[in-house]
Image: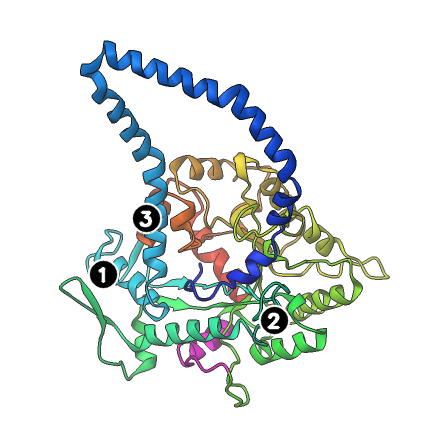
Amino acid sequence: MHAFNLSHPNLSVFLSRTDWLDKAIGSMRIFKIILLITLLTVLFPLIFLCFIIYIIYVLLFAQKKQTIKIHLQLVFNKYLSSFINKVSRTLTFYEIPLEYQFLVLDYFLKSKDSKFGEDGSQIIIGEAAYDKIILCPLVIDFGRKNISEGAFYNYTPKSPIANQVGDLLYAIRTYYRFNVDVKNNKMSLSDEIMDLEESKRNKLFEIYPFMGLDTQNYDSWEDIEKLLDKYFKEFIKDETAKVRRKRLFKKMGELNSNMYNKTEGYYLNIFAGIKVYPQLGFDPYPDDLDERKKVEGLYQYCIDKRIPIISHCSDGGYKPEDNDELASPLGRWKKVLEAKNEQSEFIFSELTLCFAHFGSQSNKKTVWRDAIIEITKKYPNVYTDISCNDMSVEYYNELDKLFNDRNPQLHERILFGSDFSINLLASDAISYNQYLNAFADTALSHKTDICEQNPERFLFGGE
């Protein structure tokens, strides 16, 4: 999932990375010619014809004028109104202060969800009852070293991602230090909970964020290695899932928003893994050798310490320009997994990697999805997830059909995910409750693998 507010995306940098304006200006002359021809030969005559037909209709069937109004209202409600509602509910959630967001999700699940048992302590998924929901907020590195020359204030902070991380850590701390009181449709924080360890044991969520990283934003591999040591130095490749989870759980909720603390070991074990976002420009296997040294160092570091990586893998998302080659499992990621050393040995075949969104493509294309299925046959630590995909019965039925003799490994490589709160805009979900319930109610097989066993193995390791 994602946990940020509208102050975190670096929108000015986002816009500066697109070339849509240059393309528009460059093609303006031919656009004007095409537009003029279209207006003269098609639109004007068509508009005039429609006007004449309407006049005749009104004159002959004046009593049925209301029919047109009703029809227009139906069109509005079906299309435009649906879009406005999606935007509205998305903005409504993003306008909630970040420190409240986990508390809000918790409160609405427990108070407005039929999937909780009679005592409200467990959530029911299929035939299984669960005590905890693990959330993995994925931090996105929206930054660049500087903004385009057209901006007067064209220098960004050295660590533009720091504030986003600080806000997230404060939100996690707030979740475990407080409950919420709701009176007269207003929500406020309770008195502070002093026993943090007991609160963590009793809360519904365990929250393990992923650090956003774009290697291009750092001058050298040495700078990246120093950053990774700051957060992941204590990770051990062969430790059990129980040991890693226990260490992350111990640190969870302890830190505030201060991202400039100099205390040794202060930031260790606050992240469970790393998030990369190719559609924003992260190149999994750059042609430039200096840039490639950075990503190769990252992958080897993650293999040595068994740090999971989640990569955005759909042809949508935060997409300022066409970076499908970077995001595709058939593009640069294919080169990563097939890279060999001088002894012709695969270098990064042990990388723990999740292709998010199951390679979702527009127009119901399945090329990326099918490629991911084949990759999971070859590489034992490659996973995918179903976040921000269609939550309909039809989607889950189609997914279930993929669990067959041709893909015997697949049910052990798929992770449940929601991509909340992005899915409020991208799907028909109106809430986290509804998205979770749609999964719980479907007849999809292997639910225990998808929502428990596979995520545990991906996040924490183990058999």
Looking at the rendered structure, the kind of residue marked 1 is: Gly
**Residues at discs 1 and 3 in contact (Cβ within 8 Å):** no
- The single residue placed furthest to the top in the displayed view is 60
The residue sitting at 54% across, 47% down in the picture is 316
Magenta part of the chain: 242-259
Mark in front: 2 vs 3: 3
Q: Which label sits on residue 430?
A: 3
Element at badge 1?
A: loop
* Mark closest to the chain's N terminus, 2 or 3: 2
Q: Which residue is mark 1?
A: 120
Residue 343 lies in what quarter of the image? bottom right
Q: Check residue 238 in the rendering and tell me which mark sits there, or answer none.
A: 2
Estimate the x, y position of residue 459 in percent, counting from the top left: 51, 64
- The spot of residue 288 in percent (x, y) is 78, 61
Expressed as whole percent of the image width and height from the top left, the position of residue 372 reads 61, 46
How many labels were placed on the picture? Answer: 3
- Label at residue 60: none
Residue 279, position in %: x, y?
59, 53
Q: Is residue 199 above or below residue 342?
A: below
Q: Alpha carbon of mark 1 to alpha carbon of mark 2: how far?
A: 37 Å
Disc 2 marks a residue whose amino acid type is Asp
Is residue 460 or residue 1 the one in the foreground?
1
Q: Camera-side residue: 182 or 16?
A: 16
As helix, strand or loop, the secondary structure at mark 2 comes to: loop
- The one nearer the camera, 143 or 3, is 143
Instruction: Identify the residue shown where x is 37% and y is 60%.
Output: 94
Secondary element under disc 3, as helix, strand or loop, is loop
Indicate the quadrant containing the N terminus: top left, top right, bottom left or bottom right: bottom left
